[in-house]
Image: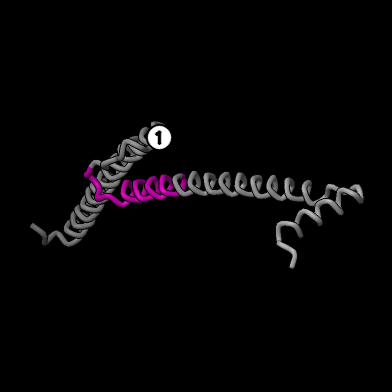
């Protein structure tokens, strides 16, 4: 019975005799292929981690913006520090503008009420003038 070690040696000798060193080269290319695959996999995992981190940040920004725009009027929005400065400025400006819009809407209602009251008074005065019975 031939030992497995002798069998391996015989195969290598036969291949070398035929002028082919293919098994050795194939082995090296397989190792290189595995190494390249591992490197690609590692790079992809790093990309996934970066994308997950970016997604978490975007979700946090979304929640912060949602809270800022659904807050009750008059309440100052509590803005997290991780928002970019330009967004913080825009949100502060929006809060000021919202307050101004509310103030202007109240003024419009007041003007409409006064105008309606004056119109009613004029109508009453005209009615009283026609009937001369009004005191």
Say which residue appears at 52% left-offset and 44% top-offset.
Answer: 46
Please tell me whether mark 1 sits on a helix, a strand or a loop: loop
Q: Quadrant of residue 130?
A: bottom left
In the rendered image, the residue lying farthest to the right is: 18
Say which residue appears at 19% left-offset and 57% top-offset.
Answer: 124
Q: What is the span of residues highlighted in magenta in the rendered image?
A: 54-75
Say which residue appears at 23% left-offset and 47% top-offset.
Answer: 110
Is 110 in front, or is 84?
Answer: 84
Q: Is residue 85 left or right of residue 15?
A: left
Is 14 in front, or is 96?
Answer: 14
Q: Is residue 23 left or right of residue 20?
A: left
The C terminus lies in quadrant: bottom left
Say which residue appears at 40% left-offset and 34% top-offset.
Answer: 84
Q: Examine the residues drawn in magenta and state their main secondary structure.
A: helix
User: How far across and down, in percent of the image, does residue 33 sit?
Assistant: 70, 48
Is 107 in front, or is 73?
Answer: 73
In the rendered image, which residue does mark 1 sit on?
84
Is 134 in front, or is 67?
Answer: 67
């Amino acid at each position: 019975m031939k030992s497995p070690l002798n069998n391996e040696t015989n195969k290598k000798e036969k291949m070398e005799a035929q002028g082919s060193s293919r098994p050795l080269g194939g082995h090296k290319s397989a190792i290189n292929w595995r190494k390249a695959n591992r490197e690609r996999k590692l790079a992809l995992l790093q990309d996934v981690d970066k994308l997950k981190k970016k997604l978490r940040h975007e979700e946090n920004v979304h929640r912060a913006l949602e809270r800022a725009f659904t807050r009750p009027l008059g309440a100052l929005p509590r803005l997290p520090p991780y928002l970019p400065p330009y967004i913080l400025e825009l949100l502060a400006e929006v809060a000021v503008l919202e307050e101004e819009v509310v103030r202007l809407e109240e003024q419009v209602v007041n003007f409409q009420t006064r105008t309606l009251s004056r119109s009613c008074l004029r109508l009453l005065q005209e009615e009283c003038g026609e009937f001369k019975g009004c005191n």
